[in-house]
Amino acid sequence: MQDAAKGMEYVAVVDFGGQYAHLIANRVRNLGTFCKVCAPEDFDGKAEGLRGVILSGGPRSVGEGDVEAMKGRLAGLEVPVLGICFGHQLLAAVYGGKLGKGEKRQYGDTLLEVEEGARLFKGTPRRQHVWMSHGDHVAELPAGFRVAARAADCAVAAYEDAEKELYGVQFHPEVVHTRCGLSLLRNFIGRCGVRTPWEKEGIRERVVARTREAAGDETLFLLVSGGVDSLVTLQVCIEAVGADRVRSLHVDTGLMRKGESDDILRFLAETGFRNIEVERAEGVFLQALKGVADPEQKRAIIGRLFVEVLRARLRGMGLGDGWRLVQGTIYPDTIESGGTKQSAKIKTHHNRVPEIQRMIEQGLVVEPLKELYKDEVRELGRELGLPRALLERHPFPGPGLGIRFLCHDPEGAEREGTAYGAAGLDLPELGEASAALLAGQPAEAARVANLRGRILPVRSVGVQGDERTYRHPLAVWRKGGTGEWPLWEVAKALGNRWVNEDARINRVVATADDLDAEGLEIRPTSVSKEGLDRLREVDAVLSAALRDDPDVWQAPVIALPMFGADGRQAYVLRAVCSRDAMTADAFALGWERLAELSAAVRRIDGAGVLFYDLTTKPPATIEWE
């Protein structure tokens, strides 16, 4: 890309470790302007061809060191600057503004009120929805700056200094859930006056060429999980070096969805690919996971065992040193694993465990998709001629059901101070307190007042302000399991508010069941074949119900270590709408459908309460672990 871009005018993205820095550059290039990503210390404001600067988000608060460093780097800069989230706060502080710690955090969908004449918002509605993820905020603007947009809990949601061409937005215009985000970026690029249009490279040609170069003369060895990423990666390798130099291994870990391994092998046989071996390793993986509750430890174990199985198979094949391991790593995997200089680790993906990192450092790993997002992977798959049915399958994580089976170690919970007791922490005032917020909507207020709440004694991973959180879900239900639910959008908006205001939680789940009557309690639980088999059945029922809905991008089903008085296990359905996995919105399932699916789950032996996750990403990741 750098050779092709030689002599191009460009916009620089200064990466402060935010989840979306690479995505910002991706969006700018797609708008026809070349874009480079650089670390703060590598930014050169005098570089030839620089026509604009975007300061990215980041996982920490703005410090004095950041302000002083950027003062020097921005001194004398004569091109437009756009600050996003952390960058919005940093830019204001550099020019003399003051920052504040937010009493209320904001994550997910937020309604924006745009001021008249705001340059960045030209051609967009005065009221628009944006995607927030922040705790800190700009409390006082520098001299010469003016507010460009406001939100209910963010007085300076955007600002501008038209004379200096300085702009800041507290939200993320680069994510698909900010509905006018591309228009805002296009307006900023227009202010930059870039005179050399950038024509986006074809994904197929670029990825295949880089894979061929990375492979050299070696044999490529790929672990095929059966997900979209691994199967697209396999096709890239075949096109890059030919099928004879590609070998693959499918490891049946016992953590697959129902019928998954057989479906994968059937597909590969139908495409004519024969160089695949199968390792049935269920016993090895389940034994290693026995008694393990911590999600990071589970991920590490699964990743390590993959490498051990791989090395054993390679020794048996007699390839010596003439091979390279190929992984279907995509960019969200890298950034969530803390894979850029200043980014925070949200969760360790199986292809970033220590054993794999050492192989990467030794030059033994090829990752054709590592700069792509999920939507780009699917686009590449279409260019490679993969069937639509395969490309539109719901994504499935490499560790499989191992990270969708939440476990509970009582001693560990007590040691960490996270145990709320058997039933959790009741919030009986939740409904009535929330109803007070709907004084102008008496019918909705009455429905909301009927809600009860309980913070469940389990935890899941979230991403809040570009940092990892590991917090509890808030469960809501109707008193006695009866009465009308509030409108779906009202419930979602309240859920967003509850997460923003209660630091103990990072997601909200709802159930059609009456938790008061269920006697739901947490019990010691670890990964087992019996539990996995039941999860497979629940997953199959719920996946079949949602598979044909085009708005559902992914629908993980999670087994909780919680059981009713009748011994039936509780589950969570997490259906989301997304495009690139960087942000996600909860699919509008509807209360009647939730009740229908709950009844279907109860028809499965040993399955009980079904929760539905109402939370956006951020603050909650798509997967729970």
Image (spheres, rainbow, N blue to C red):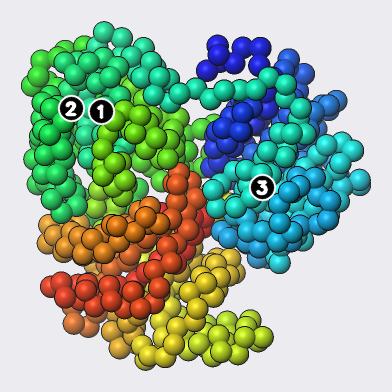
**Relative to 232, is 434 on the left or the right?**
right
Cα distance, mark 2 to mark 1?
Answer: 8 Å
**Residue at screen point 14% across, 44% down:** 263
**Relative to 13, is 234 on the left or the right?**
left
Q: Are marks 2 and 1 in contact (CB under 8 Å)?
A: yes
Residue 531 in view: no
The amino acid marked with disc number 3 is Cys
- Which residue in the protein does label 2 denote? 248
Cα distance, mark 3 to mark 1?
Answer: 38 Å
Q: Earlier in the sequence, mark 2 or mark 1?
A: 1
Callout 3 secondary element: loop
**Residue at screen point 73% across, 49% down:** 123
Q: Earlier in the sequence, mark 3 or mark 1?
A: 3
Toward the viewer: 584 or 424?
Answer: 584
Toward the viewer: 160 or 281?
Answer: 160
Residue 514 in view: yes
**Relative to 438, is 326 on the left or the right?**
left
The amino acid marked with disc number 2 is Ser
Cα distance, mark 2 to mark 3?
Answer: 42 Å
**Vertical side of 172 occupied by 11: above or below:** above
Q: Are marks 2 and 3 in contact (CB under 8 Å)?
A: no
- Which residue in the protein does label 1 denote? 234
Which of labels 3 and 1 is toward the front?
A: 1
Percent of width and height locating residue 441: 62, 86
Category of crowding for the residue at label 3, using alpha-carbon neighbours closer than 10 angstroms: few (below 14), some (14–19), many (at least 20): many
Callout 1 secondary element: helix
Callout 2 secondary element: strand
- Which residue in the protein does label 3 denote? 85
**Residue at screen point 16% across, 63% down:** 537
